[in-house]
Amino acid sequence: MKIIHVDMDQFFAAVEQHDQPELRGKPIAVGHDAERGVVSTASYEARRYGVHSAQSIQVAKRLCPQLIIVEPHFQRYKEVSAQLHEIFHDYTDLIEPISLDEAFLDVTENKRGMELGVDMAREIKERIRERTGLTASAGVSYCKLLAKIASDWRKPDGLTVIHPDRALDFIAQLKVEKIWGIGPKTAEKMHRMGVFTGQDLRNMTLSRLTQEFGKMGRVFYDFARGIDNRPVVSEWERKSVSCERTFETDISERSAVTIHLYQTVLELVRRIEKNGFEGRTLTLKTKFLDFQQITRSITVDHPLRTKDDILPLAKQLMEGVEFRSHPIRLLGLGVSKAGNSQSGSPAEARKQPHWVQLELEFKDW
């Protein structure tokens, strides 16, 4: 199997610097310049100062006083992403998008009849540069795990191939943080176990890993041995539609919560209509002043499509949230095809609320 992972370099920032030549060579961060704004993408010039994605805009400006904040232009990013996929489809239709700026391509059998994955990756990179004026990094290997790691290996504008014969040696010297699924918390736990590299992970028994990490223990056991049988999936069934709002100022007044909940419901309905989605589980997410996050869900026996379907349930779920003494900084709603809450009426959900502490750490590549 031949897998290529293509990852655009500093994508949002690169598009802005391409479209606005006066920004080239300068430290920029794409994001909303507000008290609670977050960096979406930082240019390489900004990264030298420690600025990075998901960082507070205010922190980024302290690290880099000359930082230029650029408002995002998502429609433009989607246009460039569409151009990338036109190029990808010249080689294969087995394309798995990960985000606007990265994708896996299964080129085992490709439209160009090319034998070597590295030749295709090199050609794709060149065509991206010619078409968009942007650079991409690419990784080539026999599985998604290693193709992804390879694309990160020589950023920016890199091209790395991990041959099956060299895979085990390559993994052995990797820091465990580079392995898919191992985020900061998992890495910290592994470090306490004496696991710092791929070789250390390979030395762990399957029983110990499953004891410590549950089902992911088997995944880590396989990954340490270069085993990743996940296919490139070109079509996904959408399982949920959601939206959320982060407030400039924490809200604790019932009137403010009611207004924002109503507005969030309207946005959710708009997204459901746009995607033609049908789901029966409504989930409410709240993030508080102290960054604690909880969710509460209810499943009903009919599809949730309209404001009249969703708003009463959202209000019922919100009733159990104590926000007067625990101000809310983020509010989110989502509709999904399956839920882990009790089925039944809102009244039943109110009597037996289902609360879950969110774990957002598992988000690594």
Image (cartoon, rainbow, N blue to C red):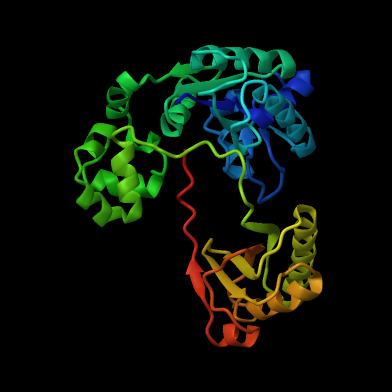
Q: In the rendered image, which quarter is residue 283 located in?
A: bottom right
Q: Report if residue 275 is visible in the image.
A: yes
Q: Is residue 156 above or below residue 10?
A: above
From what the image shows, is residue 200 above or below residue 269?
above
Quadrant for residue 305, please give it.
bottom right
Q: Nearer the viewer, residue 116 or 10?
A: 116
- Quadrant in which the N terminus appears: top left
Q: Say left or right for 273 vs 175.
A: right
- Residue 45 placed where, x, y %? 60, 23
Does residue 28 show up?
Answer: no
Say how many tags the image has.
0
Name the residue: 57% across, 79% down. Answer: 343
Residue for point 39% across, 37% down: 228
What x and y, as percent, mark residue 95? 60, 32
Relative to 160, say whether 208 is above or below: below
Q: Is residue 316 left or right of residue 114?
A: right
Where is residue 63, by image quadrant? top right
Question: Between residues 298 and 243, which one lies in front from this camera angle?
Answer: 298
Q: Residue at x 53, y 21 (%)?
A: 138
Coordinates of residue 134 in the picture (x, y in percent) = 67, 19
Q: Is residue 54 left or right of residue 168?
A: right
**Looking at the picture, how far across and down is residue 137, in whole percent?**
55, 21
**Residue depicted at x 64% and y 26%:** 27
Looking at the image, residue 311 sits to the left or right of residue 250; the answer is right
